[in-house]
Amino acid sequence: MPLALLALAIGAFGIGTTEFAVMGLLPDMAAGFGVSIPLAGYATTLYALGVVIGTPLMTALGTRFTRKQMLMLLMGLFIVGNLLTALAPNFGIMLAGRIVAAFTHGAFFGIGALVAADLVAPQKRATALSLMFSGLTVANVVGVPAGTMLSQHFDWRTTFYAITALGVIGLLGIVKLIPAQRAKAASPMGSELAVFRNPQVGLAMLMTILGFGGVFAAVTYLASMMTEVTGFAPSSVIWLTAIFGLGMVGGNLVSGRFTDRAMMPMLFVSLTGLALSLAAFTFTAHDKTAATVTIALIGIFGFATVPPLQKRVMDQAASAPTLASAGNIAAFNFGNALAAWLGGIVISAGLGYTAPNWVGALMTVAALGVAIFASVLERRQTSRGQVVAAGGPSVVADGSVVADEPIPAAHG
């Protein structure tokens, strides 16, 4: 695989750390600002909403730059947002810093996914995507536990200073390793918007919102659940988040390989496993061993959904993929925000710290239903001659579905 994928993985590592670190810092952040745990959960919810809002704005801006230039700009903004979070004198400013950092998230992964796919042969694109997203998963093995440890030994602000430093490293990696000749500009915005007339693009994004979003219903409140329900010491949250991260790494890498061979079956398996794991967590959270195993399973099945969900959108929007690719990253985070918000509601309603697990399980079951519906619809379209399997469907300016010409596989 090209060395340039390492640069994308480094950037993903920094973004993944800032996104997921809050699950280990939430009690300390709540205590530091004198707010409740559900209110402190807005550090996750507003970050995710910032991704949703920032993705189309930053992607539209990206049409004026090459992809490499845009990735550099995004990492610069990421640095500013995390530094503002670390320096925040009050809860409101901290949330503002989270939103600024979040503005970079969707466009980075959306544009980065296109660069990663362009670096390899067509039959290896899902593997390339999983390698780029491995930075996000490794962040949960190394970055999030390290951030939790820094918070417990110093304070939560130290964690965000460290994340700011990661952003600087990510920026240098992009400058040095991404080849300029691979950094092509996006398609015209009119073409980018036209692909959303394909109903399969919308269905794929709905799968993303409901499917991966279910993970965040549980993990946003993981620290509180493990200490208040399971009986772990606060120091145990460090290695529990590492267990979750290891599951994410394994699920992501295995899924990338199987997605290249059978995308929809991989999606069905991962969503089913995730729904069952989240439902089981309501009960296993009362036992330390069972809870640990379930945390790993949520990580495995949760991130096993990422390569097929992202590839599904990119395939369905093949004629103009930039906005759709970035938009699906926004869909991931809209689901995260929705799940974290719903999780906070059921906790505030007095249903306990395990109640968000049912929220996540129900969201994931709904995603599985959407995936089955989309698959049936696609088969019906194929049987009517509206879709040609080779090359996948494209959407032209009038919104009709047409067949792409088969693309020869690259070699070498």
Image: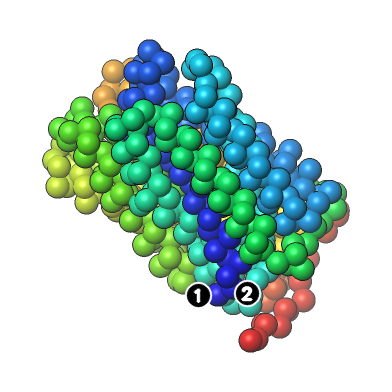
Residue highlighted by disc 1: 261
Name the residue nearer the viewer: 360 or 105.
Answer: 105
- Residue 18, compared with residue 139, is above or below; it is above
Which amino acid is tagged 1? Arg
- Position in image of residue 97 (x %, y %): 57, 28
Q: Residue at x 49, y 51 (%)?
A: 13
Which amino acid is tagged 2? Val
Q: Badge 1: how crowded within 10 Å, few (<14), some, or many (20+)? A: some
- Residue 35, compared with residue 402, is above or below; it is above
- Position in image of residue 283 (x %, y %): 19, 39
- The answer to whether 213 appears left or right of 295 in the picture is right
Q: Residue at x 85, y 53 (%)?
A: 188
Identity of the residue furthest to the top in this view: 34
Q: CA distance from mark 1 to mark 2?
A: 16 Å
Name the residue nearer the viewer: 204 or 146.
Answer: 146
Question: How many numbered marks are there?
Answer: 2
- The answer to whether 283 appears left or right of 46 in the picture is left
Kindly indicate the quadrant of the structure image that contains residue 227: top left
Q: Residue at x 36, y 62 (%)?
A: 250
What's the mark number on residue 120? Answer: 2
What's the mark number on residue 207? Answer: none
Quadrant containing the N terminus is: bottom right
Q: Residue at x 21, y 39 (%)?
A: 236
Q: Secondary structure at mark 2?
A: loop
